[in-house]
Amino acid sequence: MMILEAETTGTRSLDPGARIRLPAGMVGLPEATEFELVTSEDSLPLMWLRSTGAERLSFPVVEPGPFVPNYELELNDADAEILGAAALNTSPLVLTVLTVKSMAPQKATINLIGPIVINRQTLVGKQVLLANYERYSVEHPIIDETAEVGTC
């Protein structure tokens, strides 16, 4: 097992136009294996993982670190080997798929159980199922609606 911690210092995206390879595809989409990360300073932390294949699939993604302090990814040995995690000189790019239900942004959630982990050096990634999945949710809210709102 290998344990990684998602960065909380903000987005360190990849070079524009960089091609990310997910050799195993994404869950339910094994044929979607090549992507680019589309970012805009105006829309951060929201980014788009867009396939370069014929279907041109796009997924809204965010880095989980700013939303989930101490988010630890426990990778199984096979996933760590595919990602070359043991040889990483820099922390990997961790992305979580963002879901907005009923067009209500305050209900947006991220999938913490199945993050996309990308080796920043090789640009090879994998959507993994965390070995410590029981600590997290596939529908983690990014806005805490239980937090008290200040009054004037």
Image (cartoon, helix red, strand yellow):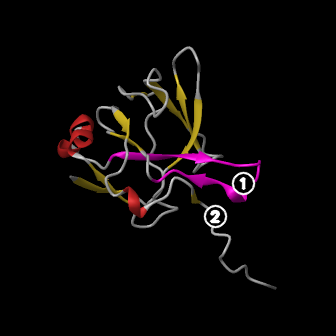
Element class at badge 2: loop
Question: Residue 146's x, y, as percent?
Answer: 66, 75
Q: Is residue 4 above or below residue 58?
A: below
Q: Label 2: few (<14), some or many (≥20) within 10 Å?
A: few
Element class at badge 1: helix
Q: Residue at x 62, y 47 (%)?
A: 99
Does any portion of residue 121 appear in the rendered image?
A: yes
Q: Could you say which disc has been placed on residue 143 in the image? A: 2
Numbered marks: total: 2
Instruction: Please tell me whether residue 79 belongs to the stretch shown in magenta.
Output: no
Q: Quadrant of the C terminus?
A: bottom right
The reply to whether dot 1 and dot 2 touch (C-beta < 8 Å) is yes
Which image quadrant for residue 60? top right
Q: Is residue 18 above or below residue 47?
A: above
Residue furthest out toward the top: 54
Q: Which residue is mark 1?
A: 105
Residue furthest out toward the bottom: 152
Report the side of 83 relative to 109 (left or right). left
Question: Residue 149's x, y, as percent?
Answer: 72, 79
Q: Is residue 93 above or below residue 104?
A: above
Question: Residue 77's x, y, as percent?
Answer: 20, 44
Q: Looking at numbered disc 2 in the image, what kind of residue is underneath it?
A: Ile
Q: Looking at numbered disc 1 in the image, what kind of residue is underneath it?
A: Pro
Q: Residue at x 39, y 66 (%)?
A: 70
Q: Residue at x 76, y 53 (%)?
A: 104
Q: Could you say which disc has been placed on residue 15 in the image? A: none
The span shown in magenta is 92-112
Report the side of 130 relative to 10 (left or right). left
Does any portion of residue 6 appear in the rendered image?
A: no
For marks 1 and 2, the one nearer the N-term is 1
Please state which of residues 28 and 58 is positioned toward the viewer in this rendering.
Answer: 28
Q: Label 1: few (<14), some or many (≥20) within 10 Å?
A: few
